[in-house]
Image: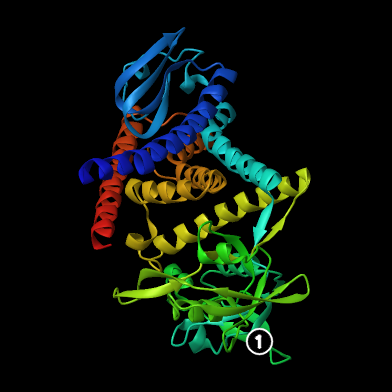
């Protein structure tokens, strides 16, 4: 029974959402190539979701529309082009008007980049829709909490410091701070802040630190003890606590932050405890008994702690149609820039490839976990992956769109096609490199999974 339950969770929660999301992204990508090829009069012999072998499909006109067995990508096979199939039979004949090789440089560039453009536009469109329909959720504070002994502490940052700007860019919430930290990854970062009523600046030099150290800075938002969502059938909801209430005291302890509140609640499992709450300007008294639950310490030890079933309050902002469009474009451009910078750090050896690359297993876990949170969260993940897919495909690696683009541009500059043998060798080397990269990523995923 446990095995059946495990298999059910594996398929329904992780594998199915992965195939669905990747299927949509691949379809949109290949649709870009397909539509551009049709527009410029190039014959499309096959439109495949997945890599060979072919499972099933239908022939409509000159094109075989099919589903293939390996759901890790897809391809559009165009007449007169050396692609993943390495089919050279057509290339030995004189070029025909309907063949890719017969077209001038601009149509070739447009066809090859159309998939990347479609993925990027899809990312913008999804972000746009989410921001328009759902608005924007932000953490309404620039005050920080610092963990003793971590990087932020060693820099001289203190809990309750209030950030004013990061590298000269003013910040209004925690998301602004995170964005600027990512934007300045690897560069000297200047924090302007207020401490005890006095403004001062603190500079963080990354040096040889890796990107993963960004999540190890040891600082986070110092949230007010203001209630957001309440879990039904938990002590807080049953005692009458409401969303928007601010907890100002628990027992004899004055509460000035979410973390301070959490510490007191966790330390009092099963104990009837008086709470003082600020609601609409009035102070109320409630009695709540934190539920006894099991948790794990940072060292992995099991402990019994108290829990009342509340989540922090986050500010929800409605955006107009055009404000959402601007935010969608900004988010996609930011992600694209972050990927470029991250790739540069991996290539230069600053960041470890093992820690930076995620394969199908890691992506499946991310998608499955996020899909359980909300449909909106899944859409955001899909938008992010669409932008990442666009970036990866435009890399100048043989067998990827970027590799084909380099060959097209070289031929355009030389004003003649490269020898067929050269194209074949380039394609074979590219496919070998991709295969080696996929093996490394799969191994990395499995090793990470087993270690966790």
Could you tell me which residue is drawn at 52 percent across and 87 percent down?
A: 155
Colouring mode (rainbow / by chain / secondary structure / one colour): rainbow
Q: Does residue 35 lie above or below 174 as drawn?
A: above
Q: In which quarter of the image is the C terminus?
A: bottom left
Could you tell me which residue is drawn at 57 percent across and 35 percent down?
A: 118
Q: In this view, does 170 lie to the left or right of 254?
A: right
How far across and how far down the image is residue 52, in percent?
30, 26
How far across and how far down the image is residue 146, in percent?
53, 83
Q: Which of 118 and 278 is in front in this view?
A: 278
> Quick one: label 1, few (<14), some, or many (20+) residues within 10 Å?
few
Q: Which of 327 and 427 is in front in this view?
A: 327
Could you tell me which residue is drawn at 23 percent across and 58 percent down?
A: 450
Q: Quadrant of the N terminus?
A: top left
Q: Which of 51 and 172 is in front in this view?
A: 172
Q: Is residue 292 left or right of residue 339?
A: left
Q: Does residue 59 lie above or below 137 as drawn?
A: above
What residue did someone put label 1 on? 201
**SS class of the residue under badge 1?**
strand
Q: Does residue 388 lie above or below 39 as drawn?
A: below
Please identify the quarter of the rendering in which residue 22 is found: top left
How far across and how far down the image is residue 45, in percent?
42, 16
Q: Does residue 34 lie above or below 176 as drawn?
A: above
How far across and how far down the image is residue 354, in percent?
32, 60
| Residue 450 seen in this snapshot | yes
Q: Which of 408 and 39 is in front in this view?
A: 39
Q: How many labels does the image show?
A: 1
Judged from this view, the residue extending furthest toward the top is: 61
| Residue 183 seen in this snapshot | no
């Amino acid at each position: 029974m446990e095995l059946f339950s495990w298999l059910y969770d594996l398929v329904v929660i992780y594998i199915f959402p992965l195939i669905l999301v990747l299927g949509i992204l691949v379809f949109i990508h290949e649709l870009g190539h397909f539509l551009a090829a049709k527009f410029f009069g190039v014959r499309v012999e096959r439109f495949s979701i997945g890599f060979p072998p072919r499972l099933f499909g239908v022939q409509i006109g000159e094109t075989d529309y099919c589903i293939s067995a390996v759901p890790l990508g897809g391809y559009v096979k165009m007449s007169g082009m050396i692609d993943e199939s390495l089919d050279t039979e057509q290339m030995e004949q004189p070029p025909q008007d309907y063949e890719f090789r017969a077209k001038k440089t601009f149509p070739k560039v447009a066809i090859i980049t159309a998939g990347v453009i479609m993925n990027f536009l899809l990312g913008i469109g999804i972000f746009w829709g989410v921001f328009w329909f759902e608005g924007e959720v932000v953490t309404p504070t620039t005050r920080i909490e610092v963990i003793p002994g971590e990087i932020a502490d060693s820099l001289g940052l203190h809990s309750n410091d209030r950030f004013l700007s990061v590298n000269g860019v003013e910040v209004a919430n925690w998301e602004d701070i995170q964005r600027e930290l990512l934007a300045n990854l690897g560069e000297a970062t200047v924090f302007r802040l207020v401490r005890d009523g006095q403004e001062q600046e603190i500079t963080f030099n990354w040096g040889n630190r890796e990107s993963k150290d960004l999540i190890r800075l040891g600082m986070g938002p110092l949230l007010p003890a203001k209630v957001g969502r309440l879990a039904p059938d938990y002590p807080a909801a049953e005692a009458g606590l409401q969303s928007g209430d601010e907890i100002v005291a628990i027992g004899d302890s004055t509460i000035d932050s979410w973390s301070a509140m959490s510490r007191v609640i966790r330390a009092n499992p099963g104990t009837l405890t008086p709470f003082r709450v600020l609601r609409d300007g009035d102070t109320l008294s409630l009695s709540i008994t934190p539920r006894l639950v099991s948790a794990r310490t940072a060292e992995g030890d099991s402990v019994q702690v108290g829990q009342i079933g509340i989540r922090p309050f986050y500010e929800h902002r409605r955006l107009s149609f055009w404000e959402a469009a601007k935010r969608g474009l900004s988010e996609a451009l930011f992600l694209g820039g972050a990927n470029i910078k991250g790739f540069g750090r991996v290539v230069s050896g600053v960041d470890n490839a093992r820690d930076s690359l995620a394969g199908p297993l890691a992506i499946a876990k991310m998608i499955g976990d996020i899909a359980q949170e909300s449909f909106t969260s899944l859409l955001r993940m899909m938008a992010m992956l669409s932008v990442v897919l666009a970036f990866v495909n435009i890399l100048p690696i043989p067998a990827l769109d970027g590799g084909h683009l380099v060959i097209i541009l070289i031929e355009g500059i030389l004003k003649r096609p490269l020898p067929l043998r050269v194209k074949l060798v380039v394609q074979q080397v590219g496919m070998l490199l991709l295969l080696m990269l996929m093996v490394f990523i799969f191994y990395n995923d499995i090793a990470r999974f087993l270690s966790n």
